[in-house]
Image: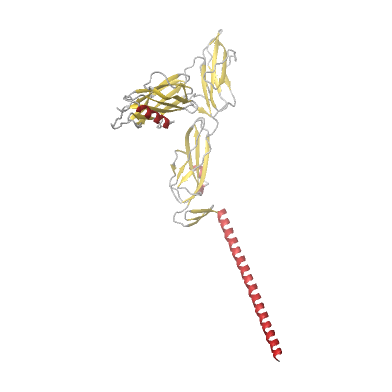
Amino acid sequence: MRKIFLVSFILFSLFFIRVDFTEAGGASLYLSPQTGTFFVGSTFDVSIFVNTGENNVNAVEVDLKFDQKKLQIASPTAGRSFIAVWISQPTFSNTEGTATFQGGVPSPGINTSSGLVSTVTFRAINPGEVAVSILDSSQVLLDDGKGTNILSSVGRGVYKIIIPPPEGPKVFSPTHPDQNKWYNNNSPTLSWEKEEGVTDFSYSIDDSFYGVPDNISEGNHTSVSFADLEDGIWYFHIKAKKGNAWGGITHYILLIDTTPPADFTLSFEPTLRSPVMTSREPTVSFITTDSLSGLDHYELKLIDLTKVPQRKETEFFIEVFSPYQLPSLNTGEYEVMVRAFDQALNRQDSSQKIEVIPIDKIFYITKKGINIWTIFLPWWKVILILLFLIILVLIIILWQYKRHKTLSQRRKALKEIEEKAKENGQEIKRKLGETKV
C-alpha cells in the first residue's frame, strides 16, 4: 500500500512539473490537544497537524496507534483539512487500535507550520490514562519530483479518562472501592445511599457503560452482591424512584481480572546449554504479557541453596526490571525466582536453578554432572558415553577374538595341507622308485 501511495503521488506531481533542489529540512507531525481530561462515555476531538519545516510538501501519510480498550474512533475525519486528494479514504480499526490517513495536494504543495491533516473524533469507553501516538511509519513527502520523505519527528497525546459524576444514588463498594483499579476479586459487593423520600431502586449489571436499568423495582435495600463474574469490565447501573418518578442513572465500573500473566521462562547471559556457568555476575532476562489488566511489575528472589536452614530468614523479593544483573555470586548452587504481577496483583512465577563453578578448573564435578572446561555433561549423558565406550571396547575385543580365531584356523588348515602335500610327495617318490626297479 505504501509503495502504491508513493508511486501515485510521484506520478501526480509530474503533471505539475516542478523540481526543487533546495536542501530538505525536517518535517514533523503532532497532535492537538496533547493533553486533556474527559468523561467515560463522552467524545472529544484530536487534530493531526504537520509542520513542513519551511519546505514545500505535497503528500502526507499518518499512522496512528491508540489503546482500543480505552478509546474508540467515532469518526476519522471532521472539520477542515489541507488535503486536496485522498489517495485512499481514511481507514481505522477499533479492534486493533489503528488509523491511517494518506493524501496530498498538487505541486507546488504546501509550506506551513500548522497544516491540518484531519481531526479524529474519539469516544472514551473506559477510565484510565491513554496515549494516542503517531507511528514512525508515517511519512511527509517533499515536492521535489522524487517523493523524498523528510519526516524527522512525530508527536503523541496523553489523555485522562475519568468516571462521570453520579446522576442517581451515590454508589460505593467495599470490595472494589476504586473504579480505576483492577481487582482479582470476582464477587463484588456494592452499596448506595438512600435519600429521604426514595421508595424503590432499580439496578442492573452488564458490560456496557450505556446500560439502563428497567422501571421494575428491585426493592428498597441499599446493597447487593454478585458472585463469580467473568473477567473483564463490568458496569453497575442504578436509579432511584421518588414519588412516581424515576431519577437519573449512576454508573459504577468494576474492573475484574483473576487470570495471572502468561507463563514465561528465564534466560541467562552468558548463555550455556545447562544450569552450570562460570560467570559470577550473570544477567537474567524475562518477559511475559497479560491480556486484560496489563503487567504491573516484576519481583526477583535469589536463593542460595547452600544456606537452606537460614534461607527463609535472609532472602526476600525485590522489584526488578529485565534484564537484571545478579549480584556477585560465590561458587555454589542458586535458585533464581521471578514473579510477574499484573495490575490486579495476580502473579505468575518462574524459577531456574543455576550452579556457579570456578572458571580456573578445566575438570569440575557437580551434583548434576561433569564440567569439562565450558562443556557441561549431565550424569545421564556421562553414563551413556561410558556405556557406549564399554560397548565399543567389547565390540573391538570380540572382533579381535574372531579375527584371531579365524587366523588360527587358517594356519591350522595350511599346516594340514603342507603335511598332506609332504606325505603325497613321499608316496610319489616311493612309487617312482618301485617302477625303476
Relative horizontal placement of residue 79, taking residue 229 as reference (left or right) = left
Q: Residue furthest front?
A: 436
Please tell me in which quadrant of the rendered image residue 402 appears.
bottom right
**Residue, x 65% and y 72% (percent of image)?**
409
Q: Can residue 333 be seen at all in this image of the molecule?
A: no
User: Can you say which quadrant of the picture contains the N terminus?
Assistant: top left
Relative horizontal placement of residue 128, taking residue 105 as reference (left or right) = right
Relative horizontal placement of residue 110, taking residue 353 as reference (left or right) = left
User: Can you say which quadrant of the picture contains the C terminus?
Assistant: bottom right
Q: How is the image coloured?
A: secondary structure
Please tell me in which quadrant of the rendered image residue 30 appears.
top left
Q: Nearer the viewer, residue 137 or 213?
A: 137
Q: Nearer the viewer, residue 87 or 97?
A: 87
Above or below, 429 relative to 144: below
Please tell me in which quadrant of the rendered image residue 218 appears.
top right
Q: Can residue 362 be seen at all in this image of the molecule?
A: yes
How many labels were placed on the picture? Answer: 0
Q: Residue furthest top?
A: 244
Place of residue 115 in the rendered image (x, y in percent of width and height, measured from the top left): 35, 23
Place of residue 204 in the rendered image (x, y in percent of width and height, measured from the top left): 57, 18
Q: Nearer the viewer, residue 130 or 364?
A: 130
Above or below, 380 relative to 210: below
